[in-house]
Every structure is written in C-alpha cells, then in structure tokens.
C-alpha cells in the first residue's frame, strides 16, 4: 500500500507486502522459515514437515504430521486424462514448458478446488499442488526420454517417490538409496520458499486478481524458468562444463569482471544476499556426501566449481560487489551426479518452490483487506502532443 512511489530499478527498497512466512537478512546471510533457521531445518526436519510449517505457521505434532503426509500421499496421482497433455508436446520440449502447460491445465481438471472463496476448496488445491508437482516433473522427464510414465507409490516418502518415478522403469525396479533420498529431500527444503523473489511475486500478483490457484502457480513456473532466477542452476552447470577445468577458471572470472562483457558467473550473486547464501553452504556439504556415495572422486565439474568458488571469493571485484555463491551454485552438481539432465534442474526447483508459492498465495488470499495488486510507474515518455496526419509525417 505504498502511496508514495519511490522509483528503484531493483525494486529492492519498496516493500511489496507484509508477510510472516520467510525472513532473509542479506547482510548476515540468514534465512528463517517461520523463525526457524534454514540450516537447522535442513539437518533436523524433512520436506513435508517443512511444507506444514510454511503453510500453517507452526511445526506439526506427530498426529498432525501423519495426517498431512497421508493427505499429500493420497493426491500424488494425476487425472488420467492429463496424460494427453504430455503427449501433445514434442519429445524435445523443455520440461519447464511442459510444467507450465500441465500445471495450467490443472485448472480444467480440478475445477472442484478453484473457488478461492471456499476455504475447503483452497485447502484441497494446496494439497493437490504439493502432491502432484513431483509426478508432473517426473512425467515431463520420462516423456523427454521416451520412457513410459511410472506411477507414484504410497509406500514411499515424498523425495523417494519422486526419484522412483524418474528412474524406475516397468522392466527394472529402482531401489532408492537413503542417502540420495535424503539429499533430494534436503534440496527440496532449501528451495521451499525465499520471501518475495520474482516467481513468488508473480504468484502473489496473479493471485491478487482472484485467478484460480493452479493458474497462479503456472505463472510462478513461467517466471522461475528464467536463467537469472531458477534457470540459473541449469545455466551454472552448463557454465562449469564450458570452463571444463580449474586452470581455465581465471579466464572466466576476468570475463565476468569485464563491464563490456555481458557474461555473468552463473550461481553467483544475489539481489538480497550480500553474504554467503546460507543454502549454498548446506548444498555444498550435500554435494560432497552424494559424490562420495557415488564414488565420484575426481569429478572435473566439482573440482572446477571448488576452484571457481575459491578464486571468486579472493577476487577484488567479487569482494567489492559482495558476490557470493548462491543456492544454484552447487545444486546442479548434486542433480547431475544423481543422473538428472540439466533440463530437469529447474523443474526440481519448481516442484520444491511450489509450497512457498502456495503458502504466500494463501497468506495473501486470507488477508481480509487484500486488494488487487496494481504497481505504478514513473512515466518518462513523450509529453502530451496532437495527432499528425500521415501526409505530414
Ligand atoms: C535465485 O530473489 C531470490 O530470492 C532468487 C532465489 C530464490 O530462492 O528465489 O534466491 C533464486 O534466483 C538465485 C540467483 C540465481 N541467478 C544466478 O545465479 C544468475 C547469475 N547472477 C546474476 O544474474 C545476479 O547476481 C542476480 C540476477 C542474481 C542479481 O542481479 P543484480 O540484482 O543485478 O545483482 P546485484 O545488484 O547484486 O549486482 C551487483 C553488481 C552489479 O554490477 P554493477 O551494476 O553494480 O556494476 O554485481 C554485478 C552486477 O552487474 N553482478 C555480477 C554477477 N551478479 C551481479 N557480475 C558478474 N557475475 C555475476 N554473477
């Protein structure tokens, strides 16, 4: 409700809303979900418990958690007709394009949970979105590699179910390694919410017009896709692969410093963090655990990443600009080691961020004084002038 509009190209100083969900201190590198530090949640909690915390504001007791997990588990299947949406895409379609399309199509299949004025329907929509995003992401992956869809199983936990849907085939069971399941669950927790980032602000703005929740989340998926935002994990791994080895790191750091060169080090820098992204620290530890488990010792990508991080953290330019590794710097290394193609990195970010998007949407929709979002502008165009007939132009 800013009645005095202060123009800021980064829109960082104008608060767009009040929220009780996530707190970031960019200078200290702190991130809290409902007051709990992200590193404690990553270590001691698990993704569905974090979902409950983000949605309802408090950690659940055992009975509440069991009920919530059962409700999510029983909504992981997609309406069978939705298979035809996947088949309408070319096999080489980017999975984020598929997710945009299929999530938006949920508005048509789950219209019994699109009335945002009905609290029961809102709650069902929230559960359906959290439950079905892993299935949508996994099926987008299966479709892209020409393998049959694998259905969710009710005997697997959330992260294991996702890995199973991605890597099992009808011919061969995929036994989920508990360390990989834990790593995937941790990646989901680290990406769950992040205050008013571009995609969350997109969801809030779309939701403020009372569009149905599925359409709002589809808008969030579209915004996250960009390489400056959620697409950075894919762009970061492609950059590390292009650098290729530690001895070429210097060349790329110099490119990133060159103001005449639009190249930016993917996975570095952040609009809010002017210190180490706390998620990157947890991600780095997880990367080492996964690579050790998989016996990937001298992974050139990880060696290049570690050399790049060391070089950048000593670099005058990066220090002066307060550029540190962000959440996307290590996530791609873990996902690649697990066997995911880079095109699947952002869909995994999207399925993880869905609970953040829907929690922020819920907070906005339940605000009794909520109004439609209507950002203003500073007009810098032509002053008023009369029309000129074409003969005189
Ligand atoms: C995410 O908002 C969120 O919370 C996002 C996110 C979330 O969880 O939702 O945290 C997820 O999107 C993380 C960021 C992923 N993006 C990347 O890793 C792409 C590479 N990073 C940059 O594109 C950039 O750092 C941004 C987009 C993240 C931030 O851009 P800004 O706001 O322009 O960065 P800034 O204001 O902090 O930049 C300060 C200076 C600028 O130079 P000057 O204009 O002051 O001369 O540092 C420069 C920038 O040009 N700079 C970089 C750089 N990032 C910023 N220079 C080289 N390499 C980089 N990566």
Image (cartoon, helix red, strand yellow):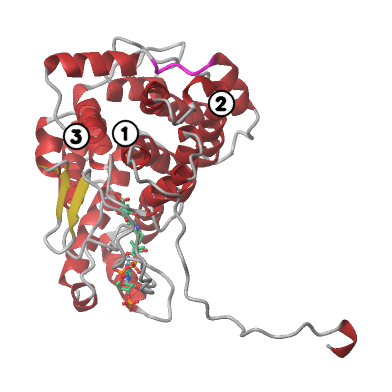
Residue designated by label 2 = 146
Compare marks 1 and 2 and give the one earlier in the sequence.
Answer: 2
Q: Residue 114 in the image: state x and y as whole percent.
A: 49, 27
Residue 259 % position (x, y) = 38, 80
Q: Are marks 1 and 2 in contact (CB under 8 Å)?
A: no
Other residues around mark 2 within 10 Å, as few (<14) / some (14–19) / many (≥20): few
Residue at disc 3, secondary structure: loop
Residue position for label 3: 57
Q: Residue at x 28, y 39 (%)?
A: 192
| Magenta residues, start to end | 75-79
Location of residue 99 in the rendering, given as x and y in whole percent from the top left corner: 50, 35
Please give the residue where the numbered disc 1 appears in the rendered image: 338
**How far apart in space, not on screen, are marks 1 and 2 (Cα)?**
19 Å
Give the residue displayed 22% in from the left and 43% down from the top. Answer: 21
Is there CB contact under 8 Å for labels 3 and 2? Answer: no
How crowded pointer 3 is (Cα within 10 Å; few <14, some 14-19, many 20+) is rated as some
User: Foreground mark, 1 or 3?
Assistant: 3
Ligand 1 resides in the quarter of the picture at bottom left
Asked if residue 76 is positioned above or below residue 276 in the image, the reply reads above
- What whole-number distance in Å separates the C-alpha atoms at marks 3 and 2? 41 Å
Residue 351 seen from this side: yes
Q: Mark 2 near ligand 1 (CB under 8 Å)?
A: no
Magenta run includes residue 78: yes
């Amino acid at each position: 409700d800013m009645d005095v509009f202060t123009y800021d190209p980064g829109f960082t100083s104008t608060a767009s809303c009040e929220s009780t969900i996530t707190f970031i201190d960019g200078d200290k590198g702190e991130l809290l979900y409902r007051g709990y530090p992200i590193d404690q949640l990553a270590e001691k909690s698990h993704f569905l418990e974090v979902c409950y915390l983000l949605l309802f504001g408090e950690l659940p007791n055992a009975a509440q958690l069991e009920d919530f997990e059962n409700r999510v588990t029983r909504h992981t299947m997609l309406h069978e007709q939705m298979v035809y949406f996947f088949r309408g895409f070319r096999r080489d379609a980017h999975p984020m394009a598929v997710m945009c399309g299929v999530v938006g199509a949920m508005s048509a299949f789950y219209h019994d949970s699109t009335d945002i004025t009905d609290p029961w329907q809102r709650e069902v929509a929230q559960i359906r979105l959290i439950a079905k995003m892993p299935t949508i992401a996994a099926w987008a992956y299966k479709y892209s590699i020409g393998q049959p869809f694998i259905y969710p199983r009710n005997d697997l936990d959330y992260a294991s179910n996702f890995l199973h849907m991605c890597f099992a085939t009808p011919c061969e069971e995929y036994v989920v390694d508990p360390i990989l399941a834990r790593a995937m669950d941790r990646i989901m927790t680290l990406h769950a919410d992040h205050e008013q980032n571009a995609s969350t602000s997109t969801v809030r703005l779309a939701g403020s017009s009372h569009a149905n929740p599925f359409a709002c989340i589809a808008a969030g998926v579209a915004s996250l896709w960009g390489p400056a935002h959620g697409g950075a994990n894919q762009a970061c791994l492609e950059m590390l692969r292009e650098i290729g080895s530690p001895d070429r790191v210097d060349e790329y750091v110099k490119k990133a410093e060159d103001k005449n060169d639009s190249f930016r080090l993917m996975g570095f820098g952040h609009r809010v963090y002017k210190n180490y992204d706390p998620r990157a620290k947890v991600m780095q530890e997880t990367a080492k655990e996964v690579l050790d488990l998989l016996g990937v010792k001298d992974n050139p990508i990880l060696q290049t990443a570690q050399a790049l991080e060391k070089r950048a953290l000593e670099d005058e330019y990066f220090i002066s600009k307060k550029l540190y590794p962000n959440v996307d710097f290590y996530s791609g290394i873990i996902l690649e080691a697990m066997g995911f193609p880079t095109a699947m990195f952002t869909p995994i970010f999207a399925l993880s961020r869905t609970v953040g998007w829907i929690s922020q949407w819920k907070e906005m929709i339940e605000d009794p004084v909520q109004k439609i979002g209507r950002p203003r502008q500073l007009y810098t165009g032509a002053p008023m002038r009369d029309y000129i007939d074409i003969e005189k132009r």
